[in-house]
Image (cartoon, rainbow, N blue to C red):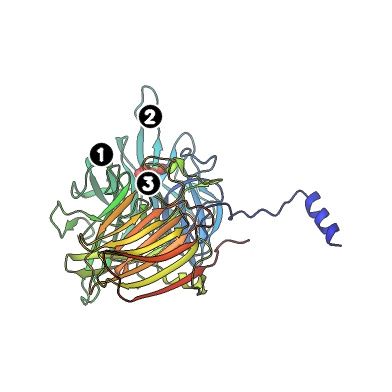
Amino acid sequence: MRACLLLLFLSSGFAPVRVYDQPYRPQFHFSPREHWTNDPNGLIYFEGEYHLFFQYNPFGDQWGHMSWGHAASRDLLHWEQLPVAIPESDGVMIFTGSTVIDERNTSGFCSGGKPCMVAIYTGHTPARPGHAGLQTQNLAYSNDRGRTWTKYSRNPVLDLKLSDFRDPKVFWSRQTQEWVMVVSLPNDHKVRFYGSSNLKDWKLQSEFGPAGATGGQWECPELFELPVEGAGSETRWVLKVGLNPSALQGGSGEQYFVGRFDGRGFRNDNAFSTTLWTDYGKDCYCALTFNHLPQGEHPVMMGWMDNWQYAAKLPTSPWRGQMTFPRSLSLRKTPEGIRLFQEPVKNIARLQGSEIKTPETHTYRLRSEMHLGTAQELGWRLLSDASHYTLIGYNRRNAKLFVDRTHSGLTGFSKDFPARVEAPLHLTGDILRLDVLVDRCSVEVFADGGRVTSTNLVFPPAGANGAEPYAKGGAAGAITTTVNGIRSAWPR
Ligand code: FRU
């Protein structure tokens, strides 16, 4: 009987394919089934679903033919990849952007008396001999929860005749009762704020920048409001901008500004030279928050877990590129000022297995509190075997947290990959608190309650399962650790 079934199975032409189980395939981070992805786009929550659109090449594992891929989830953990949402057409690529829910049909795109989803994206026409490239802002809309999309027949809605003008983030402003667009002038190191009552006609309100880090192009702007924890009804706005190249750790990375926004313009609370980084690792770029979350929910942000320096060379197949784990954001007062804190969304607990002593796979969460004791340096050696390891450590002398992946495994595919990255971190009470997500080819570190994050890809050899604390230049004090395996979020 068994033999018959097997024969039937094989002759039917279907082999049992483990689609999400190739070497290095993330188990609880989103990656497309196959092909290339970069930035997350159009993150939005609508009618019980989280939507993740993403920069996608439907035809291969290198950047090109940029279109919006699509995946949906009910819990931010399990994603179902859906057909391409907005494809490249007529030689115009669909670059990064956002989506909104048009509750009151201000655009006229919604049918059946129900709210619809509107995407605002950059249309990119590549340069060709004799013609400069062109980037404009465009609309598309969907009346079936993002499943099918129609491009607006009168695109573009914003055209400055520039070859660099991109990545619109749009949201509804309760202050002005209008739509706000934050969009980047990459070479000027500026973002612009536009206002509109119908998503089609946009009026320039103000500009911000240059400020902070300006070594590379400014891309992927994002703006959102957060309560300041423990400060009553006080809020601040966070303006986040991607920088490529010349970010803190080389290549692409992101900075943020804390300030006030009145619906028309942004005022930085800090001196214009103050540079704050959202992540101190090499691999978190073009992060975006979900629009339209239920009232009272803290913003949730996801980024592209990658770096333009080597994104095209990552040793993964048949996909290239993945997202960070979704992060819950908050603003807290610190001795240095008001800062952005990031923590993995609480839902992660649903994928957590029971506590384990030592990891036997490369998919786990490690939380630990380490009293510094007399140690000059202490931390964790993860994903280790006799000759490989990834270090997450704290150096007391210079008050820096670091992640060192120079011996992590496959590193030679790009000269920019082997790296030791650092983040300033003045510990409270001489205790190093770490929350670390390990998912086959990535290590996401949330330190000191999310005050510092460091996101880094790693490609360890199979079987490099070691996870040991270490100390140097003295002895560590008490260490408490919890390790939980994380179950795969993908169907087997
Ligand atoms: C950032 C970026 C965006 C652009 C997109 C194109 O990673 O360069 O500015 O819209 O990628 O894929």
Above or below, 481 against 138 in this view is below
The mark closer to the camera, 2 or 3, is 3
The image shows residue 428 at horizontal and vertical percentages of 23, 72
The disc label shown at residue 459, or none: none
According to the picture, the residue beneath numbered tag 2 turns out to be 127
Viewer-closest of 146 and 331 = 331
The reply to whether discs 2 and 3 touch (Cβ–Cβ < 8 Å) is: no
Q: Is residue 43 left or right of residue 267?
A: right
Q: Identify the element where label 3 is drawn.
A: loop
Label located before the other in sequence (2 or 3): 2
Left or right of 277: which side holds 416?
right
Indicate the secondary structure of the residue bearing disc 1: helix
Q: Which residue is mark 1?
A: 187
Q: Which residue is mark 3?
A: 418
* Alpha carbon separation for disc pair 1 and 3: 29 Å
Q: Amino acid at mark 3?
A: Pro
Point out residue 224 in the picture as x, y percentages from the top left corner. 29, 61
Within 10 Å of disc 2 (Cα), the crowding (few <14, some 14-19, many 20+) is: few
